[in-house]
Every structure is written in C-alpha cells, then in structure tokens.
Amino acid sequence: MKIKIALTKGDGIGPEVVNEGIKILKVISDYTDLEVEFQEAPAGGNVWKETGESLPKKSIDIIKNSDVLLFGAIGLPNIPQGVAESAILRLRQELDLFVNLRPIKLYRSLKEQCPLKDEFVGEGIDFTIIRENTEGLYANVGGFLKDEVAVNSMVYTKNGCERILRYAYEFAKTHKHTKITSVDKANILKPSQMWRNIFKQIGDEYPNLEQENYYIDAFCQWIIRKPYAFETVVTGNLFGDIISDEAAFLVGSLGMASSGNIHPGKVSMYEPIHGSAPDIAGKEIANPIGTILSIKLMMEESIRKPKIGIKIEKAVELALDEGRTKDIDNYKLKTLSTSQMGDLIANKLKQELKS
C-alpha cells in the first residue's frame, strides 16, 4: 500500500520535530506493507519572508494531491502577528478539516511530571478532546474599522454543529466510552445554546452514552480537579483551543501532545500542538514525541492501520523508561537530545514491528 505524505516542516523547532517523525515513518515503510513517499510543501513565516505568502499555491496543490499532511509548527517573532499562522487556518478551511482530535493521556512513567496531586490524578488521565475546527470565532468573520473597532463574529451553523457532534458520539461509541461531555457557554451565548440543543438531539440516538454539559469556565476548573473523570469531550473551536492547551500540561509537557486536523475519508493534517518555539530552535532540546504521537493518530484515523498506531505508542512508552528530553527530564534517566529521542523511539518501534 503506497502512501503519499506531504511534509510542512515550518519554522522554529518545526523542522527538528518533523525530521524525527520522518524517521518513524521510514521504519514503518521498512517493516510493514506500507510504502511511504514524501513531498515537501513549504509554509510558514520563513516562506512568507521569501515569497510574500505563508502558504503558496504550489504547497496547497501538493497537499491536496497527497493522502495526508505531516505538519511541524509555524510562526516567527520578527514578522507581523498572525501572518504565518494564517496558513493553518487556510488549510483547515480549504481542506474542510472540521475535526480537531486531541488526545490527553498521562503515561505511567510520566506520572511524576504531572503538576497535580495524586488525589486529582486518580486512576489516571486518558481522555480525548474533539474540537470543532472550521467555525466559531476562528472562521474569521469580521475586521477592523479605522483602527478603532475590531470585530470577530462567533459563527455556528446547524450543519457544522451536527457533523462534529455526531463524529464525537461515534468516536465515544467506537472507543467503548460510557460518557460524553460537551463544553459550551450556553448561559450567555446564542451559538452555544444551539450547540447544546443539537448535542441533546443527537444524543437521543445514543441511549447507552451518558451525556453531561459543562460551561467552559467551570470545565477549566474541573479539568484540574478531576481529569480522570472524562472520556470523550466535545466542544467548539475557541473553547477547544483553550482547554486542549490547558490539558496538555497535565501529561508532562506541551511537547507530549498530539493532534489531528481531520476530514474523515479525505486529506487530513497531523501535527503536534506546541508552537514553533523559536527561542529553542537549533538547540536540539525540543521534544519530538508530540509529532510521533501525531503519526500514531495518522495511522489510526487516515491510514486505517490501528495496529501500527498501537505499536508506535508502545515504542514511545518503552523509550520513556530509558531517556527523556529536557522538558520531561526527571534527572534519573538519560537526558536526550531531539534526535536521540527520535532514534530511541525508532529503534523501539523496529523491535515492536518485528515481534
């Protein structure tokens, strides 16, 4: 089976972490029936400085003609705000990537890195945030008026709510979850009120799933007080951005967090949720695990090879028992560079795929 993978390495630490992801994909290509073909699709701040565009047409065309996109990180401090990041929003819109899938899992060997007390961790943290990815405030409906007024409208459509909520219910059902949690601000916002109504309507078709609703401000508290209590969490674009970044710190580091920007059955994008971190670029201290776990999601959601995804995760867990990058260092194991961490996980994956 041949897979065409577009690569957008981006800015800052983006190229470093994507390079480690490529190692993992090459191992998969060498030890499974998947044949991987790469093509670079440059985007981001450096591309904008060279061409005046953060996402050139040539790159878009490469991505649209690929099976999946592996994306690093974009953004630079010395260019206008939002210029580089507009490439991500454009990709989400042009490819209609309405699902943003963000797993939050605390691995056993990183329990000491969690900032919470044991009583708040409970039996463990393992839930998935499903974020609507194309509407809300990030649809970018609005603008400036004479530099005195700035407006963005929170746009929810019935179709947009229905498709992401149905995806979430199906996700919970497929993963044998018992409960689904919706996060909104329905006590104030009209879009959230529509969202909550549709959440209940679709939920009537899934009687075996317990439904619960949280306001965004309350959920930000409960995600700290009882993160072990959640399984599938579904929410809108802005709220999903906030809670997934907050939750990422529960699992040891932002560098551990993965994501998928998905349109089921179509070209989808997989990326770590950390930023470009230009202050540490080139220092070989970035954590590549968020990228590698994004490839796990890629295998599960787009390539439909869940067994390979399981083996990638196992390789990560085994590697964490031997060494860590600086952000998750516990001073008991070897401190590894970005490339050393990638090499270690790649070697563990070889062993898993051979077994």
Image: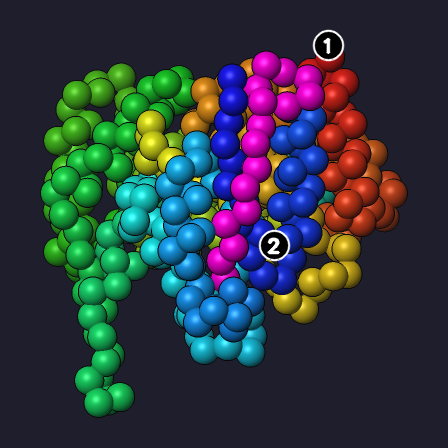
According to the image, label 1 marks what residue? 355
Could you classify mark 2 by the number of other residues whose Cα lies within 10 Å: few (under 14), some (14-19), or many (20 or more)?
many
The answer to whether any part of residue 330 appears in the image is no
Count of picture labels: 2
Percent of width and height locating residue 263: 33, 35
> In this image, 200 relative to 69: left or right?
left
- Looking at the picture, which amino acid does disc 1 mark? Ser
Q: Residue at x 61, y 54 (%)?
A: 14
Q: Secondary structure at mark 1?
A: loop
According to the image, label 2 marks what residue? 14
> In this image, 313 relative to 318: left or right?
left
* In the image, residue 251 above or below residue 315: below
Q: Is 37 covered by the magenta stretch? A: yes
Could you classify mark 1 by the number of other residues whose Cα lies within 10 Å: few (under 14), some (14-19), or many (20 or more)?
few
Q: Residue at x 19, y 27 (%)?
A: 203
- Looking at the picture, which amino acid does disc 2 mark? Gly
Q: Secondary structure at mark 2?
A: helix
Magenta segment: 29-45
> In this image, 242 relative to 32: left or right?
left
